[in-house]
Amino acid sequence: MGKKKPYAYCTTCEKEISKPNRKSMDSMYYTVWILIIIASIGFAIIPLLIYQFIIKKKIFCPNCDSILVFYSTPEESPEPKTQIKRILKTIETEKKEKAEGETDEDYMFCPFCQKEITKQAEFCPNCGVKI
C-alpha cells in the first residue's frame, strides 16, 4: 500500500482540509450493500451444500446407521460375514450365556415361536402368547 498522505485540498471550495472524512452513506447504499451481502451468503451456501452431500466422505452405514471403519487397502479390511455366520455366532453366545447362568432343566421351548423360555414364564417374551 502507498504511504498515507496527511494533507488534502478541495478544488471546489479551494481550501486545505486537515482531517478529511468520507461522505456518509444514504439509504440506497445501505440497501445495495445488504443485497450484496445476502447474495454472497446465498452463493456461499451452494458450494457448502455440494460439499456436504456429494463430496464429503460418508461415515455411517446406509443400512444400519452405525459408524464405519475405513482401511487403506482391501487386504486390511476384515472378511464380510454371511447371514449364516452371524446366526451361528449369536447361537454360540446364547449357549455360553446359558451355560454360565442356569441349567437346561429351567428352560423349555415356546410351542408357538420355538424360542427357549424359562419354565416359570406365564407368557412368551418373544411372541407374547400365554403358555
Image: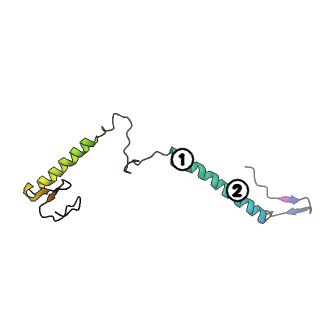
Q: Residue 33 placed where, x, y %?
A: 72, 59
Which label number is shown at residue 36?
A: 2
The front one of 101 and 118 is 118
Check the image and report above or below for 92 versus 117.
Answer: above
Check the image and report above or below for 21 versus 63.
Answer: below
Viewed as shown, does residue 14 lie left or right of 67?
Answer: right
**Badge 1, how many Cα within 10 Å: few under 14, some, many 20+?**
few
Viewed as shown, does residue 47 lie left or right of 39?
Answer: left
Q: Residue 57 placed where, x, y %?
A: 46, 45
Which element is circle 2 on?
helix
Viewed as shown, does residue 17 lie left or right of 33?
Answer: right
Q: Residue 2 placed where, x, y %?
A: 75, 50
Instruction: Give the residue pinned by disc 1.
Output: 51
Which element is circle 1 on?
helix
Colour scheme in use: rainbow
> Can I make out residue 101 in this image?
no
Hey, which quadrant is residue 118 in on the image? Answer: bottom left
Query: Which residue is situated farthest in the left direction here?
Result: 105
Q: Residue at x 9, y 59 (%)?
A: 106
Please report the bounds of the magenta region as a residue range: 1-8
